[in-house]
Amino acid sequence: MNKNILVSLIKSSSGEETCDLVLKNAQIADVFSGEILQRNIAVKDGFIVGYGDQYTGRKEIDLKNAYVVPGLIDAHIHIESTLATPKEFSRAATKHGITTVVMDPHEIGNVMGTSGLDYMLEASENLPLDFMMMLPSCVPATAFETSGAILHAEDLKPYYGKNRVAGLAEVMDLSSVKNTSDDMMNKLLDAQASNKTLDGHGSGLSPAGNNIYRTAGISTDHECTTIEEAKDRLEKGFYIHIREGSVAKNFDALIPLVNKSSCRRFTFCTDDIYISDLNEKGSIDDMVRRAILYGLDPIDAIRMATINPSECYGFKTKGAVAPGYEADFLIVDSLDDFVISKVFKNGNLIWENGEQKFSYKEDKREEVTNTIKLPDLTREDLMITSNSGKLNVIEVFPNSLLTRRRVVNHEKNTPYIISPDEDLAKLMVIERHGNHGNFGIGLVKGFRMKKGAVATTIAHDSHNLVVMGTDDQDMLVAINRIKEIGGGIVVVSEEKIISELRLDIAGLMSSAPLEEITDALSNLEKASDEVFERVDFNPFLTLSFLTLPVIPEIKITDQGLYDAKNSRFIGIDETDSPGDR
Amino acid sequence: MNKNILVSLIKSSSGEETCDLVLKNAQIADVFSGEILQRNIAVKDGFIVGYGDQYTGRKEIDLKNAYVVPGLIDAHIHIESTLATPKEFSRAATKHGITTVVMDPHEIGNVMGTSGLDYMLEASENLPLDFMMMLPSCVPATAFETSGAILHAEDLKPYYGKNRVAGLAEVMDLSSVKNTSDDMMNKLLDAQASNKTLDGHGSGLSPAGNNIYRTAGISTDHECTTIEEAKDRLEKGFYIHIREGSVAKNFDALIPLVNKSSCRRFTFCTDDIYISDLNEKGSIDDMVRRAILYGLDPIDAIRMATINPSECYGFKTKGAVAPGYEADFLIVDSLDDFVISKVFKNGNLIWENGEQKFSYKEDKREEVTNTIKLPDLTREDLMITSNSGKLNVIEVFPNSLLTRRRVVNHEKNTPYIISPDEDLAKLMVIERHGNHGNFGIGLVKGFRMKKGAVATTIAHDSHNLVVMGTDDQDMLVAINRIKEIGGGIVVVSEEKIISELRLDIAGLMSSAPLEEITDALSNLEKASDEVFERVDFNPFLTLSFLTLPVIPEIKITDQGLYDAKNSRFIGIDETDSPGDR
């Protein structure tokens, strides 16, 4: 805050100057006392400067006893996963009363390193939503894939001085922590020294692992899927971010752990959510609604979305409707159904009855396009043969990140041709960051692909190009189209592009308006019906996670097939690996 | 934390290295879940590194289901008011389970400025209690008295970089805030920029004043005396420090406001407590006990003394028994009577059944003595005459800081002689910091002094020398003795020192062991029976507050009699002041 603003706030608070806005007859959901307060609220320069009848505003609104609720906070989100820019994200999020998010630019960090962080900070400036940033702690996520960048402790350190940086993002690499790798120790110590928050990513972490994480100073987790996991983390001092995203949905499993006594240690987050889901169904607002329906005291449900994440991340002026806090609040007529009629950000009305009131400035920033650097590939590169008479196959299962290793027989030294009655497809991961253009090739079972090819540059965590198909020529067409459009998702059938979503920003996000992204997603879904026999899961998402080498049992990266069970790469025709089936 | 420690903690957490201490069969009072947990607790290098049965320690203690409670935190204290050094303070406090205090060196700051802050930081190093420091915001407290130092924003700013500095101390000068004085704005902004906590001192502050304080970013208050005051501050986002000191006692008035929903915003503090009271009766431990007796959930009572102040001041590793937290905890057999049997600080047993286990290092630090710089005074300086035939008198009331202005008749231009049947005494405040040696002189009613003189260098907030007596010669003896002993409290009768407490450190604290201070205080009390007719209040304390010029109705400073009602100095024989009686 600068001095002029502070002086102006105090002069308005004391009544010496007129306020910008006075809300009369408000019923404040007070996160401090837990009570409902009937008050007039005075606002100046984006802050609340007082409660009381003594204030006059250049604008005054009679709320007629409607409830005023603090602006909602998403405690953990990857904006890249929405597929939209921060600007388009803010359009969808603020409609649902979200006025602050804690973002982790882990995906763009993997593609572009600190330039990605800079982009996210710049692209999220001057929007009607505050984007607080955590610094990606694990880029690359593993040594078994080739990312576009490496973020060392010394790369992250200067960012702690920046205004909107709130700490170190999800530490997912237990082994680096446990083995006290020097770079990881430096990352932890720098975050601790800044007195900021250290996020965890305790997916499947045991109680012993949680001891280690907490000992390392990590104090949040958004990966609890069972009440047992959450209980262990809660009692060890983790904040539990209850997550409901487009795929991972943990609300129902975890909400029973929240009660009057433990409530202060819980928050809500989305982690990964499509812009279309956020726009249509909401996110944090919906969790508040469900928590109230579940039977929580409405103020406790609101606390989980406001003052709790604010305390968790050390925000001193967010999460409450009270003097000294940012004038971010929602108007709701009833705390039972929690339907938002108005949204204010820094005292400005930005939504009213579903209509946007905020005018975005024209954006003249250069987007970070042209990040797709692919080798030239020919049909020969796509050829699969076997020296052993066997081929390893990745088997996927609906709505699961886990895979299984299968082995099929195949005549030695003969190119493998996909046959339509086998439920097999070819799979390639091609390094696309301009490092070396290496690629891994394999076979995948379980997608029930009947023809064509699909390709995507969203491939966790290094976001190389992954392409799958039953036809080599279609696969090449898909790869070339990705190159042309600078990244995205494409579906090809009979050498034609039948659907695509251009993700021109780092190959992860679209610079298009959210409506276009939503339409493209819907078209992709339709196109997938053409190339897949029966789609009871999202094939693009499943594809995007086949490249995560640390999740058992077998995955594929630009460096080849990876046997996560035995922590080693294996050849496509290698058969002497332990655990062969 | 340094890297070696972090690595050592993680290695012990993972079981790779043996722990220092394992507490078996502990029942942990878990401030996160609100539950009692039956766990084994592993400790290494002063930190808790895990819960679980898998740990082995070089030392292991079977707690046989005793309760383990986090070390207690005093959320606001002036160590100077205990009259003891931080070292002696730590002896009394740790016995009662207090392992962290948030200290405000306001008193020594008024005497010595930044040297006083430096002294408090140095003198509180390497003790079995963590002294976190707030930076005195109002030195001097007013312009109407002469302090030993002035602390401007630029003097305080470098201290935010120091390890144990937690924020800006009690802002008591509403008018500087309200009038947006430049230096006060800078102090507030520097504290905000450091993302640390800003303490308030909202004595008697109205709801309108509380709006201004919160708008300025001030977020704590320890001056609530009524439930109405506390309610207003609570709902505006202040943390309420419930205070029980040697004089101010607010527990009974405020505890009814604490409930399951509001509890997280309340803490306990002492503000001003004598070392003797602390040693004998305890402080924060006693408040926890009383809160449990009052009917609060024991875990909520414990939270108020542990995790709540920790969150309030942004301490990331204090206030809980959990991995990643400092191994500061108490052992109690029952949460109902809360009798402390053992105290651990950083994993070391420091008290067991009332017996101290901690060995203090020999202290070779230079104490800050020789701060008393007094002019040479003669009997003539003590002469009171009147040109108007009237004299103004300060009337005091038992156990109140408020005074009343009275006027007595006196023959013009004749030295005033105290008569034994009048309940009047002479009163002088002498500048003692070496600035100019000015003094104010007056008459005081209400002490029922029958003979002799008393003098003290504790005189809020500038801590000049205040001396009161019925006999000029006794007053001079007292002044000279204060000079000889380098500050303190003395009682003189018939030109002899009948009791004294030497406060050789800045004229505020004694370098003596706490037992000596306790004895001296008890002797002073006895001596006061000799010189005062009937003592139903503490005459030394009352004297110490007669110099606070901002509290109505009439006070005295080194600059003379001050009419607080009309905000101006008045002559001792001035009669035309409005409101004469």
Image (tube, coloured by chain):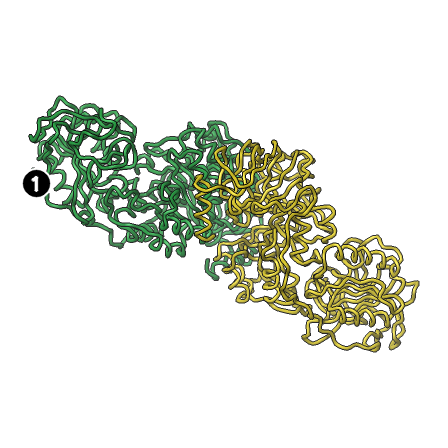
Chain colours: A yellow, B green
Q: Nearer the viewer, residue A159 or B280?
A: A159
Secondary structure, mark 1, is loop
Q: Quadrant of residue A199?
A: bottom right
Q: Residue shown at 65%/57% (left/top)?
A: A86
Which residue is label 1 attached to? B378
Q: Chain of mark 1?
A: B
Amino acid marked by disc 1: Thr
Q: How many marks?
A: 1
Most distant residue in the right direction: A421
**Residue A58 left/right relative to B132:** right
Q: Residue shown at 62%/34% (left/top)?
A: A66
In the image, residue A396 sits, relative to residue B188, either above or below, namely below
**Residue A530 left/right relative to A343:** right
Q: Quadrant of residue A300?
A: top right
Give percent across and percent down for residue A119.
61, 63
Q: Residue shown at 84%/73% (left/top)?
A: A384
